[in-house]
Image: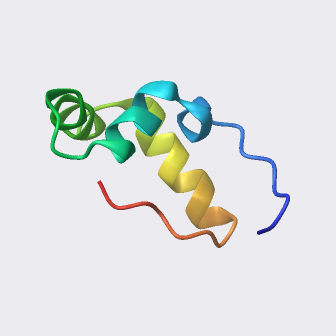
Amino acid sequence: MNDLHIESRCHTCPFRARAERKPRSLAARFWRWHTGWCPGWTGYTKELKSKGIAVPKV
């Protein structure tokens, strides 16, 4: 994996990691819902795209 620096805190978010570990949990559903309007998530996906990194599925 590349050692690219990711500015967004979404990259290391413990809430996101928890949602990925247990995708059917209530916390994961809440996390997916919040990505629809979260400006931080939007910035994170733009940053990944600009660096040529695949955007994780929600």
Residue found 14% across the figure and 29% down from its top: 26
Q: In this view, does 55 lie to the left or right of 22?
A: right
> Closest to the observer: 39 or 9?
9
Outermost residue to the right: 3
Residue found 61% across the figure and 52% down from its top: 47
Residue found 27% across the figure and 33% down from its top: 31
> Closest to the observer: 1 or 34?
1
> Closest to the observer: 32 or 20?
20
Residue found 70% across the figure and 65% down from its top: 51
- Image quarter of residue 33: top left
Q: Where is residue 1 in the image (x, y as percent from the top left)?
A: 76, 69
Q: Is residue 54 above or below residue 16?
A: below
Q: In this view, does 7 lie above or below 13?
A: below
Q: Is residue 49 left or right of residue 25?
A: right
- Image quarter of residue 49: bottom right
Q: Is residue 27 left or right of residue 18?
A: left
Q: Where is residue 39 in the image (x, y as percent from the top left)?
A: 40, 31
Q: Position of residue 41 (x, y in %)?
A: 43, 39
